[in-house]
Image (cartoon, rainbow, N blue to C red):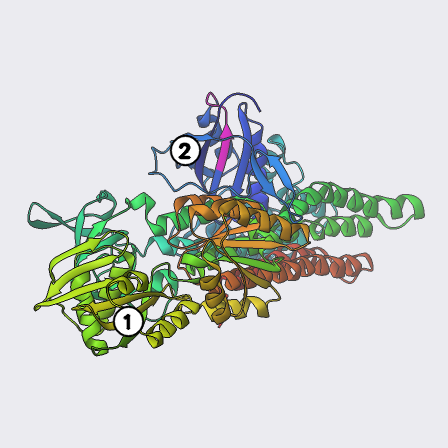
Amino acid sequence: MSGAIVQTRFRVDGMDCAGCATKIDTATRRIQGVEDVSVSVVAGTMTVRHAPAADLGEVVKKVASLGYKASQLTANQPFEGANIVRDGSGQSDHSGHDDRTAHSAPKAAAGRAKGAGRLEGMHGHDHGAEEGPWWKTSKARLTIFCGIAMGLAFLIAWAIPASGSWVFVVAMAVGLVPIGRRALSGALNGSPFSIETLMTVAAIGAVFINASEEAAVVVFLFLVGELLEGIATGRARASIKALAKLVPKTAFLEFEGKTREVPADSLEIGAIILVRPGDRIAADGVIVSGESGIDEGPVTGESVPKQKGVDDPVFAGTINQEGALRIRVTAAAADNTISRIIHLVEEAQESKAPTERFIDRFSKYYTPGVMVVAALIALLPPLAFGAEWGEWVYKGLAILLIGCPCALVISTPAAIAAALSAGARRGLLMKGGAVLENLGKVNLVALDKTGTLTEGKPRVTDIIGVQKTELEVLTLAAALEIGSSHPLASAILAKAKERGIEPETASAAGAVGGKGVVGSVQGIELFLGSPRAAGEQSKLPADIETQIAALNDEGKTVSVLLANNAIAGIIAMRDEPRDDAKAGVAALKSLGADVVMLTGDNQRTAAAIAGTLGLEPRAELLPQDKQRIVGELRKQGKFVAKVGDGINDAPALAAADIGIAMGGGTDVALETADAAVLHGRVMDVANMIALSRATMRNILQNIGISLGLKVVFLVTTVIGLTGLWPAILADTGATVLVTANAMRLLEWRSLK
């Protein structure tokens, strides 16, 4: 690959099976200047990596010639050349097609290319950019017309027996002509062994051996099966599109003292919007005034609303339940949480899992092989043993239909797409099928402490009154901290607010460098600082020092409050484990994964947190230490998932078999990681592994269904029990069953 490479994304309307994607992929790769192509059936998208001089209009025309409609979604974006892709063994594979891409945030959509007109209603796959009920699609219309034609043929044959077989030939042609045109177009564009080819050969062959009645039935059943397949695929596509519908179309913008309704996608970063009780929030942002319960269920699946106030972040698509809120917009419409989810999922669906890549390679040889076997079955018995030509040609044609690989080829991508959509709706983002497939292999999870196992901000855990009551200690300490943005000050003020305390501002308040803060409240001289600094002003009794040491052993930071140089009380704070951390660690262990904590914090704090959660701590680590430990664990034969949220986690995330970024993490962590837990729940790491394993079970079921039905019908056809129309059920029927089975993953439930 030489010179600059750019990538362009297209929306492709009309795809509903793996065969569609294969034909589009093969045809597009034949265009001059195109280096790589990735197609997602469920997302309905295609990413083309190409030279800057490549003719994108030719891409649109080529896709249109196959009966689909392509329109450009994004402007040409630089592509950074070969990326590193890990296979299941953790080895690196340098290739232009990266199953770990999808790191960049979405950009605003660029102008769309004008697509060539589609072949309206010309075949079972063609339904263009159609929305609304399935029965209004051109695919449904074609199926209905073919069904009516077949019904009329049977009626005419019953009423006029002398009409012969020609009426069934006409009925068959209603459905077969568009199928044949598609077969010819595919053959001219590099896909000669498509399902349409097999279908066309089998149907025409049936006419020549005077089985036109069965041929008409087979064509109709094929169209019915394709229609059902399209409905199932549309359901998976709708599941991710439903996320986009969560964001309201308009917002109330505050501007120059007035409020006016504007399109939500016109909101700029920094704008202030008003959200009334009961309204959906129109943009990602931060609350600047007001308090309310926010229902995040539509985005996160969380059943209990979260109480939020000033400076708390909110997400587009969530529901404001109680009070009016003023929110400062922090992300444009194209970059909000839901847009990023949709973008990442669509890109992930374009990348292929190892199992899918294997089946794709297998099917390239399998389909021509089936045609050879069918020809041998049709020709050898009559030529070698003098068997009846009609009987064995009939069986050969049935083998053609049985051998079509549609069900086998769709078995993996349908399950992967459904699982990616199901995960995205629960805040679990995986950057491709390879990541989803490999997550199930994880047997060791290395978790960062701060911001991953813990909230990432201290909370007041203990208030001990000495010469003042607990309430007085908290009130006086909060008075000193008003206006401070220090994390410990924020923790004290949050605790005071929780207790309903409204402290007065201390006079002459200020910081004493490296020691604490001072001030005066109602004539009482106050000092709040470390035990060492407090001990310099007033000797700490032995029992107080013992209490402080015990709190330190629990990993807590202790501040001592002095009032007129006397010990008023003690406040202890700690970055507490997330509410679900203990349950999340237990869930990981129940899945057979060992759990270790890697942190740069001191040994005492790490041991205290690890002891609470029941895992092994490794403390006082630099970023390179974390990276080294992950490498050592992999050398021991462990399949390692590293979970973190900060810049210092990025090297270890990249070194692990699977890197998982926690929600709210830095952009560096999110871009380095293979997967992301958007909502910061440790339990969701276990959910990712569980979803991966459920997906792999589903894929194995699908492969069993597709191959099992083929074997059964192959045997029954050869021994003469079944004919052409049951043979179509071995393919189309299996495809529908496989797709329906894969769609069950959309209803996947998280671990309890």
Which region of the structure is painted magenta? 47-53
Q: Amino acid at mark 2?
A: Gly
In the rendered image, the vertical position of residue 494 relative to residue 43, given as above or below:
below
Comparing 411 with 289, the one in front is 289
Locate the N terminus by quadrant. Answer: top right
x, y percentage for residue 737?
A: 60, 61
x, y percentage for residue 406?
A: 63, 50
Q: Which secondary structure lies at badge 1?
A: strand
Residue identifier under label 1? 570
x, y percentage for residue 408?
A: 66, 52
Comparing 136 with 618, the one in front is 618
x 40%, y 67%: residue? 552
Residue identifier under label 2? 115
Q: Work out how far the residue at label 1 is from the one at label 2, CA to CA, in angstroms.
A: 71 Å
Left or right? Give the position of 154 relative to 509: right
x 22%, y 42%: residue? 268
Badge nearest the viewer, 1 or 2: 1
Q: Amino acid at mark 1?
A: Ile
